[in-house]
Image: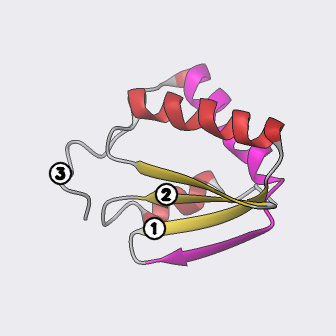
Amino acid sequence: MIEGATPESVSCTLDGAEFEDRVAAWREIGRHALDRSAGEGSVTTMFPNRPEIVEKLRVLIDAEKSCCEFLEFTLRERNDVLEMELRFPSGFESTLAQLTADER
């Protein structure tokens, strides 16, 4: 579990159209994913290391910091591949699965 995350703190502060727009933005960038692997409390997604994808991911990750403080992102550039690791508290797996269901 992510340090400091409690059931009360594991909720997004976006609502309505803002929330739907954010989900759509993640699904759009998710279409570029090369591979995805899930572990306990984390998901790692590989993307092509292209400037436009790097920029979109950085914008989305920064946006998430303001509404979903319980999520932790790490972005690593490795030659031709961009690796994004998302860490989340226990119990968030089912919500994440619902949000990403239409990505591919």
Spot occupied by residue 94 in the image (x, y as percentages of width and height): 47, 64
Tell me how far mark 2 sits from mark 1, CA to CA: 5 Å
Q: Is residue 102 above or below residue 67?
A: below
Q: Nearer the viewer, mark 3 or mark 1?
A: 1
Q: Mark 2 belongs to which amino acid?
A: Leu
The residue closer to the viewer here, 57 or 21, is 57
The structure residue drawn at horizontal position 81% and vertical position 66%, both measured from the top left corner, is 34
15 shown above or below 96: above
Give, as a three-letter code, the residue at label 1.
Answer: Ser
State the extent of the magenta-drawn residues as a range.
17-39
Q: Secondary structure at mark 3?
A: loop
Q: Find out whether the residues at labels 2 and 3 contact each other: C-beta distance under 8 Å.
A: no
Q: Secondary structure at mark 1?
A: strand
For disc 3, the marked residue is: 6
Residue named by callout 1: 42
Q: Earlier in the sequence, mark 2 or mark 1?
A: 1
Residue furthest front in the image: 79
How far, Cα to Cα, is label 2 from label 3?
A: 18 Å
Q: Which mark is residue 69?
A: none
Query: Would you say residue 48 sits in the magenta stretch?
Result: no
Residue 104, image x, y percentages = 82, 61
Horizontal placement of 78 versus 1: left or right?
right
Q: Main secondary structure of the magenta part?
A: helix
Q: Is 10 on the left-hand or right-hand side of 55?
A: left
89 relative to 55, above or below: below
